[in-house]
Amino acid sequence: MSPRTVAFATLGCRLNQVDTQQLQTLCEARGFRAVPFEEPADVVVVNTCTVTARAEFSDRQAIRRAARVSPRARLVVTGCWAQTSPGDVAGLREVDLVVGNADKRRLPELLDDLLAGRIQVSDIAGERTLPAVPPARVAGRSRAFLKIQDGCQHRCAFCVVPFARGQSRSLEPQVALDQARLLVEAGHPEIVLTGVDLGHYGADLIPRTTLATLLQELVEIPGLRWIRLSSVLPAYFTPALTEIVTSSPVIAPHFHVPLQSGSDRVLRLMRRPYNRAMYRRLVERLTTAIPSLGLGADVIVGFPGERDGDFAETLALIEALPFSYLHVFPYSPRRGTEAATFADVVDARTIARRSTRLRELARAKSLAFRRGLVGSLAEVLVLETRDRATGRLTGLTGNYVEVLFDGADALMTGLARVRVTDAERDRTLGEIA
Ligand code: SF4
């Protein structure tokens, strides 16, 4: 009998991508054969996102597409939208099974029982542990993603993530270290540590530990060139964390520190656990220690109550700090969040105008940062696919710039040295050094 086949579609953040890779590994261990999404399969799993209204639109599109590509398949929907709106998802005629985040790791078993039930959503708020799942199977990839934390203790007024992913849970340090070693032995020079609220790592464990303590051990793994941190809130940069991230050559000089707004008034409305001055001090500390730091941030535009003066403060702060890239999110209300009940909404045209202005500034900051690299030598991790437009190899620098250069396929997934030769609006060029 030929093995049952399963295909996956993943929407949303990096964490969801890691979750899908782990689900695939678990399904394969249970005898399923994974096939590309474009091929008909016996079961299709759509791993959804719910962070914006646009995300739900994309979720629905992916579900419809899955039904078109695999009309005979059983269609399973999991992820954050499935967790927060199981009734809506189950109401779609294409969907056979809804699996919430709390039940994700039971997915292979649930696939076997698919005909037995329709909705499988447990209360994620009761989840207390982050179970050890084999590290994602990522053969042929240069970078590996290791999820060491899930869930979030904060209650930012705009965010549905705590409802979708529950409270903060961390992977036991020994498990994280063993998985990191396995990934390095499998040929990944770079590991990206991921989590919803990565800086909270370890606070739920007994004994308690911290991200800084885990990093001190991770950086000792032989053969590991870079550990890259996903998003970390400013307040988590304790002296111990700042010390290790600014002193270890194994930690990539690239931090993503979410900002959301440069106005203290808006940050308070958002219930963010920091203010403008804290943010600024942190960035100055980090960039003094690492002059070539790649610095990224998320910014929400048009949060309810954001006035012209608040937006001007955001622009001024961003102008003043050396960001290398920004992710700009026009605000959209999410059902069930505190901000969705706020009356002082910003009209859609103002949100669009401010978003355009901020994106222009983001492009200018990115170009200035990349122009500053021209002429320098950089060690890069060569990604596993060529740039579509130019056919060149893509090398990712420690400070998170993709440099395009000519070279042989044999260089892919390894480390190389390139000289940065030019920075254009949308790309950075280089040559093998
Ligand atoms: S820190 Fe705030 S924005 Fe980030 S996941 Fe937690 S609640 Fe959401």
Image: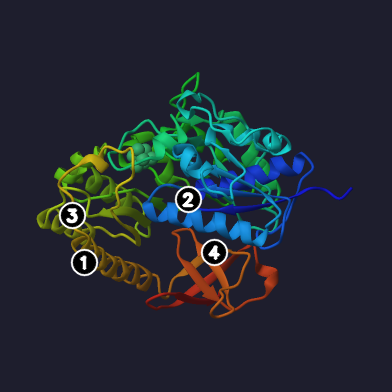
Upstream in sequence: badge 1 or badge 3: 3
Q: The residue tagged with tag 1: helix, strand or loop?
A: helix
Image coordinates for residue 32, horizontal then vertical, percent:
76, 45
Image coordinates for residue 219, horizontal then vertical, percent:
54, 42
Q: Is residue 116 above or below residue 224?
A: above
Give the residue number, with chain letter if any, for mark 2. Answer: 13
Image coordinates for residue 132, horizontal then vertical, percent:
62, 32
Q: Nearer the viewer, residue 186 or 86?
A: 86
Distance, label 1 to label 3, CA atoms, is 11 Å
Upstream in sequence: badge 1 or badge 4: 1
Upstream in sequence: badge 1 or badge 2: 2
Distance, label 3 to label 2, CA atoms, is 26 Å
Q: The residue tagged with tag 3: helix, strand or loop?
A: loop
Upstream in sequence: badge 4 or badge 2: 2
Q: Residue at x 40, y 35 (%)?
A: 162
Give the residue number, with chain letter if any, for mark 3. Answer: 346
Distance, label 1 to label 4, CA atoms, is 37 Å
Q: Is residue 123 visible?
A: yes
Q: Residue at x 86, y 50 (%)?
A: 2
Ligand 1 resides in the quarter of the picture at top left
| Disc ID at residue 57 | none
Q: Amino acid at mark 2?
A: Cys
Mark nearer the viewer, 3 or 2:
3
Q: Residues within 10 Å of mark 4 (few under 14, many from 20)?
A: many
Q: Amino acid at mark 1?
A: Arg
Q: Is there a contact, CB below 8 Å, between mark 3 and mark 2? A: no
Give the residue number, with chain letter if any, for mark 1. Answer: 353
Upstream in sequence: badge 3 or badge 2: 2
Give the residue number, with chain letter if any, for mark 4. Answer: 380
Q: The residue tagged with tag 2: helix, strand or loop?
A: loop
Q: Nearer the viewer, residue 177 or 107?
A: 107
